[in-house]
Amino acid sequence: GSMGNVCITGKLNDFSNRTKAKEFLEGHGYTVTSTISSKTKYLVCEDGSISSKSKKAESLGIPIVSIADIIGKY
């Protein structure tokens, strides 16, 4: 999507599963990926968990946000 790549980790606040969150973000023009790379724009992590994904995001300077944070940017 033209809005950039987003990776999801951990439990979500507003979606019962990751598939629904993925469809929602894709509907807003994001591409949802399963891995983090230098092309990742945001890591969605809403439960505050520390994971290999969140550590990699921090090392790459990728913002760790909630879905509400991203959609509020419209």
Image (spheres, helix red, strand yellow):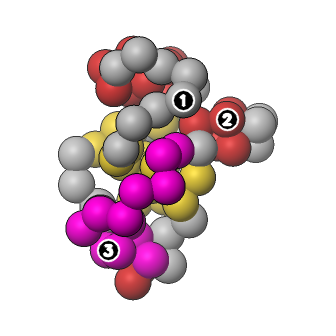
Task: Give the residue at x 46% y 32%.
Answer: 12
Magenta stretch contains residue 35: no
Q: Earlier in the sequence, mark 1 or mark 2?
A: 1
Q: Quadrant of the N terminus?
A: top left
Could you say which disc has been placed on residue 56 in the image?
3
Query: Circle 3 sits in a helix, a strand or a loop, which is it?
Result: helix
Inspect the magenta stretch and tell me whether residue 49 lies in it: yes
Q: CA distance from mark 3 to mark 1?
A: 22 Å
Quarter of the rendering containing residue 52: bottom left
- Horizontally, residue 37 falls left or right of residue 2, namely left
* Amino acid bearing label 1: Asn
Q: Position of residue 27 (x, y in %)?
A: 50, 19
**Is 61 situated left or right of 17 in this image?**
right
Q: Residue at x 76, y 42 (%)?
A: 73
The span from disc 1 to disc 2 (Cα, nearest Å) is 9 Å
Q: Which mark is residue 68?
A: 2
Who is closer to the viewer here, 48 or 25? 48
Answer above or below: position of 62 versus 73: below
Q: Amino acid at mark 2?
A: Ala
Circles 1 and 2, Cβ within 8 Å, touching? The answer is: yes
User: Is residue 38 shown to the viewer in this render?
Assistant: no
What span is colored magenta in the figure? 46-58
Q: Residue at x 35, y 74 (%)?
A: 55
Instruction: Tell me what residue is drawn at x 59 percent, y 44 percent.
Output: 66
